[in-house]
């Protein structure tokens, strides 16, 4: 059969990324050899591997995956007391914030400029966001935001220490992201408009797929024109599941898969995004579309500030993302007037939201041992997809507690940056990431997107309407894998998609 021949042709080129992180040695050849020993392609059908049906280890959700709440359950091994904390955190995650001053002292401070009134508004059902179905005013972009920046300057000392450095500065007036909503008496910053250009792609056996290329503009600018060198990067809200497990992967296990100079010559040169503290310490970036944050707490604080305009113990600005040139916004009443807790959300509530975020459980696999899924798994690996979408790691001691510690997990990501080509380039750097690089997104839960969120929009801006479109947008380091998928007979493409859909 054709797919069997493809396996024979491609398997020798498989490189790193197919072992548990605990076994990673930095030697790509050793990891590739181990693929053939553990779960590698055998007669075109990959073997089931122990534990892969429980992608979060013992923390995998115990609840049903057949409904829209599949992403909203606690770690399956969470004890009763901490499950209570999880539920309180869920309440804070869902609650609607209101503008100041208000009688609800624990819920005021919204804005003055914002993108949503609650965390849940963006992360709908704790799942994947989507681009607006239509332009304003017929639809809003509540689960999609627009990052803004202008080019910055790299310090020579930092460049020598960290290699490629791609710092940016906030847009001088509008800050780090466009807030398309505002409280009464303030002007919103603007509205996102998207137009799409369709173009056809031909696959094996004559099948045609239409891809859509987005073009973004901003209208209704409330505070004057944007800087002429403004960089735009749209971002849909990513799924929230398994974040605490990703946070607990040992840094060394991630770095073992990095090969920034492509010393093994396989065309894959994943590299870490280092997040630097003001004092100079560097931490491995793990979260966000470009791995721009190292810890869930920091990611949460930045979301509160930028998306809702709420200050926190980590980011104490009560005016959110209001810039120095937005004086009226900065001078508005806030939710910590008079000063009481040091922030509009106090430490106790903030910590509960972080705990909730760390413990949103990964759902169990669906039909992981079916013939179609196992054949698709072999094709996925043979096409080189697992070089970046590393199947498995073992967590260390987790910040969120023992329930996430020492678990063998199956996220299908290396948490590293990869050049994805011109087609997906946003041309906007973020920390160490350049304008063509993106963090490998985890694939666990991908097949439940329709069930949870009622759509199948993928990639950082939701341009892909199906998994097939998402794969066909891969370029750069992933070009060979993309082309291998396109050359597969339709039956084998369906098998590979069935495997990804089972994750």
Image (cartoon, rainbow, N blue to C red):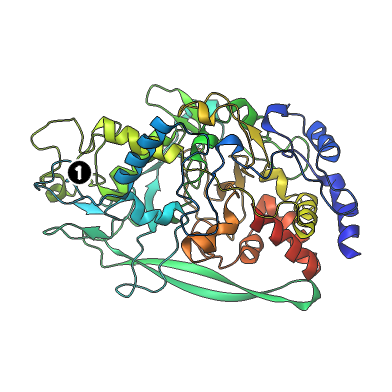
> In this figure, what is the number of numbered marks?
1
Q: Position of residue 95 (x, y in %)?
A: 27, 49
Q: Secondary structure at mark 1?
A: loop
Quickly name the residue at label 1.
Answer: 319
Position of 178 with respect to 355 (left or right) is left
Q: Position of residue 425 (x, y in %)?
A: 54, 55
Residue at point 22%, 47% (across, down): 322
Q: Position of residue 160 (x, y in %)?
A: 54, 27
Q: Quadrant of residue 134?
A: bottom left
Task: Give 323 or 26, whichever is nearer the viewer.
Answer: 26
Position of 170 with respect to 385 (left or right) is left
Crowding near the residue tagged with mark 1, few <14, some 14–19, many ≥20 C-alpha atoms within 10 Å: many
Position of 300 with respect to 61 (left or right) is left
Residue at point 61%, 61% (across, down): 470
Q: Quadrant of residue 467?
A: bottom right
Instruction: Please indicate, yes or no, whether residue 253 appears anywhere in the rendered image.
Output: yes
Q: Position of residue 405 (x, y in %)?
A: 55, 27
């Amino acid at each position: 059969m054709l797919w069997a021949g493809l396996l024979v042709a491609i398997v020798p080129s498989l490189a790193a990324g197919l072992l548990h992180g605990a076994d990673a040695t930095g030697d790509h050849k050793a990891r590739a050899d181990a693929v053939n020993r553990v779960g590698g392609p055998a007669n075109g059908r990959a073997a089931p591997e122990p534990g892969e049906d429980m992608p979060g280890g013992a923390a995998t959700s115990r609840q049903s995956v057949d409904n829209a709440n599949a992403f909203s359950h606690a770690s399956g091994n969470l004890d009763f007391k901490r499950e209570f904390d999880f539920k309180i955190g869920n309440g804070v995650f869902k609650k609607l914030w209101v503008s100041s001053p208000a009688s609800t002292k624990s819920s005021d401070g919204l804005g003055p400029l914002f993108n949503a009134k609650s965390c849940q508004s963006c992360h709908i059902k704790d799942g994947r966001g989507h681009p607006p179905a239509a332009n304003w005013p017929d639809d809003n972009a509540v689960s999609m935001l627009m990052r803004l920046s202008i080019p910055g300057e790299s310090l020579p000392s930092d460049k020598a220490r960290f290699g490629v450095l791609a710092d940016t500065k906030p847009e001088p007036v509008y800050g780090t992201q466009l807030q398309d909503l505002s409280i009464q008496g303030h002007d919103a910053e603007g509205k996102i408009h998207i137009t799409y250009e369709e173009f056809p792609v031909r696959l094996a056996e004559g099948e045609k797929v239409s891809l859509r290329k987005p073009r973004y503009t901003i209208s209704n600018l409330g505070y004057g024109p944007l800087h002429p060198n403004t960089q735009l990067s749209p971002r849909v809200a990513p799924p929230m599941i398994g974040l605490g497990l990703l946070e607990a992967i040992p840094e060394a296990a991630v770095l073992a898969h990095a090969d920034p100079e492509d010393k093994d010559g396989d065309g894959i040169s994943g590299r870490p995004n280092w997040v630097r503290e003001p004092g100079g310490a560097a931490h491995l970036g793990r979260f966000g579309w470009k791995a721009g944050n190292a810890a869930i707490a920091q990611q949460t604080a930045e979301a509160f500030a930028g998306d809702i305009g709420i200050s926190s113990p980590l980011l104490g600005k009560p005016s959110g993302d209001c810039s120095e040139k937005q004086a009226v916004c900065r001078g508005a009443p806030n939710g910590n007037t008079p000063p009481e807790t040091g922030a509009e959300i106090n430490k106790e509530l903030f910590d509960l939201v972080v705990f909730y975020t760390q413990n949103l459980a990964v759902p169990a696999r669906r039909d992981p041992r079916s013939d179609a899924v196992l054949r698709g798994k072999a094709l996925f690996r043979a096409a080189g997809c697992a070089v970046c979408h590393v199947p498995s790691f073992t967590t260390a001691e987790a910040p969120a507690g023992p329930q996430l510690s020492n678990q063998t997990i199956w996220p299908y990501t290396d948490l590293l940056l990869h050049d994805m080509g011109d087609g997906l380039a946003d041309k906007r750097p973020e920390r160490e990431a350049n304008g063509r690089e993106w963090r490998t997104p985890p694939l666990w839960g991908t097949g439940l997107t329709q069930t949870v969120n009622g759509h199948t929009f993928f990639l950082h801006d939701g341009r892909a309407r199906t998994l097939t479109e998402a794969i066909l947008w891969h370029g750069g380091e992933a070009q060979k894998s993309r082309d291998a998928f396109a050359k597969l007979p339709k039956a084998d493409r369906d098998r590979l998609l069935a495997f990804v859909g089972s994750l």
